[in-house]
Amino acid sequence: VQVFTSGSGTYTTPTGCKAISIRAIGGGGGGGGTGTGTSGGNGGNGGNTTFSTLTASGGTGGSGAGASIGGAGGAASGGNVNISGGYGGGCNGVIGFNLPGGNGGCGAFGGGGGITASANNNASASATNSGSGGAGASIGTTTGGGCGGGAGGYVEFLISSPSATYSYAVGAGGSLGTAGTSGAAGGAGGSGLIIVMETY
């Protein structure tokens, strides 16, 4: 097994390898920030993960405080199995209530960011290399919650007669949404991942 957790480059098929099975997930979107009114920053989009012609797209970042749906999950293409990432949780944006931010969307490996209470800033980032979305921020009665980021898409593919080399790139996690006026930042999205299982 070879695991790629960041960056890009060339995978070289080892001597004697008869087949390879690829599992890949795109980067998760970052969670939105909060602020008075709708001044919280939007989370950044996750990057695409690729292996040759396989693409696991990154999730969309969640919106800052304000009524909105969560970030969309990334698409997936080229594999025997192609699964879109989960949506991030939506946010209400009503001022004057302890409204939590949205949870991060979950990808194939789990690990989405969450919210543990609504009265303070506790938006967590998603797990590293999970490809899941970061949570939207929540901070109390003066701001609405931010939306959660979407998870990266997931792709699997079996190559029964592998070529000598393949190009690859691992998608970065989306940046967290910045804090607005009297607000707080969201949680960052999880980076992507590629797992190559080799059969000899």
Image: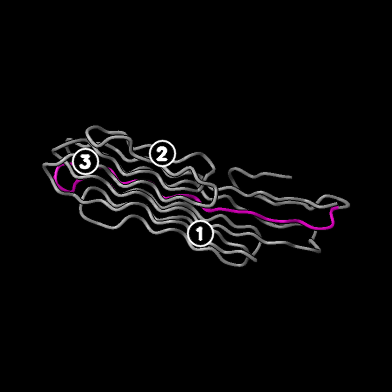
Mark 2 vs mark 3, CA separation in Å: 18 Å
Query: Residue tagged by mark 2?
Result: 125
Is 64 positioned to the left or the right of 154 in the image?
A: left
Q: Which residues are magenta?
A: 17-41
Mark 2 vs mark 1, CA separation in Å: 19 Å
Picture disc at residue 57 = 1
Image coords of residue 36 (percent x, y): 15, 42
Image coords of residue 51 (percent x, y): 64, 58
Indicate the amino acid at tag 3.
Answer: Gly
**Total numbered badges shown on the rendered structure:** 3
156 and 78: which is toward the camera: 156
Is 6 positioned to the left or the right of 111 in the image?
A: right
Indicate the amino acid at tag 1.
Answer: Ser
User: Where, quadrant-wise, is the N terminus in this rendering?
Assistant: top right
Sequence-first tag of 2 and 1: 1
Task: Give the farthest residue toward the left.
Answer: 96
Indicate the amino acid at tag 2.
Answer: Ala
Q: Does dot 3 land on a helix, a strand or a loop?
A: loop
Sequence-first tag of 1 and 3: 1
Mark 1 vs mark 3, CA separation in Å: 29 Å
Sequence-first tag of 2 and 3: 2
Is 174 positioned to the left or the right of 197 in the image?
A: left
